[in-house]
Image (tube, helix red, strand yellow):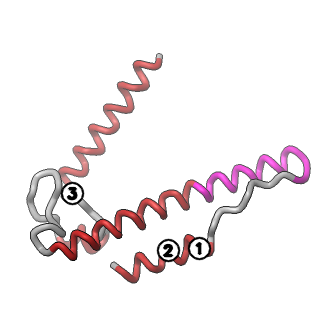
């Protein structure tokens, strides 16, 4: 997990955001700025993953009673899930429920805006 974290941090350093393009015609400027926006969103996800991996390392250091234990239900997280997603804080069932709740909340907020 530490190697994955280091690789991600190195990737962020190499792909650091640049300032938006302000030359050329309007179409060219818009295209470059959209590309910049897309890259910055990807970098935001990478930074979030770095934080999640650091938190996982802290749980791992705390011992087997903390790392690999679901924050939702307290049951062990499937080892195959942890192999694929070492920063997982929840089992698949609890994570799915959390995502459904977030989606319902987003829909309610959207409905309230209308």
Q: CA distance from mark 3 to mark 2?
A: 24 Å
Q: Is residue 37 magenta?
A: yes
Q: The residue tagged with tag 1: helix, strand or loop?
A: helix
Q: Which residue is mark 2?
A: 9
Q: The residue tagged with tag 3: helix, strand or loop?
A: loop
Where does residue 87 sit, x and y in percent of width and height?
Answer: 30, 66
Circle nearer the N terminus (3, 2): 2
Relative to 22, is 42 on the left or the right? left
Where the N terminus falls, by quadrant? bottom left
Residue 90, disc: 3
The outermost residue toward the bottom is 3
Q: Measuring 88% from the left and 53% from the top, which residue is drawn there? A: 23
Where does residue 8 sit, x and y in percent of width and height?
Answer: 48, 74
Q: Which residue is mark 1?
A: 13
The outermost residue toward the top is 114
Q: Measuring 28% from the left and 68% from the top, which residue is drawn there? A: 56
- Residue 85, by quadrant, is bottom left
Q: CA distance from mark 1 to mark 2?
A: 6 Å
The segment highlighted magenta reads 23-40
Where does residue 84 sit, x and y in percent of width and height?
Answer: 31, 71
């Amino acid at each position: 997990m530490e190697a994955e974290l280091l690789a991600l941090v190195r990737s962020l350093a190499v792909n650091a955001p640049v300032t938006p393009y302000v030359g050329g015609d309007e179409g060219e400027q818009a295209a470059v700025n959209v590309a910049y926006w897309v890259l910055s969103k990807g970098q935001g996800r990478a930074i979030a993953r770095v934080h999640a991996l650091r938190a996982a390392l802290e749980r791992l250091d705390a011992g087997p009673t903390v790392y690999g234990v679901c924050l939702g239900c307290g049951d062990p997280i499937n080892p195959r899930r942890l192999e694929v997603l070492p920063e997982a804080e929840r089992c698949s069932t609890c994570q799915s429920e959390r995502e459904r709740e977030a989606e319902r909340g987003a829909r309610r907020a959207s409905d309230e805006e209308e």
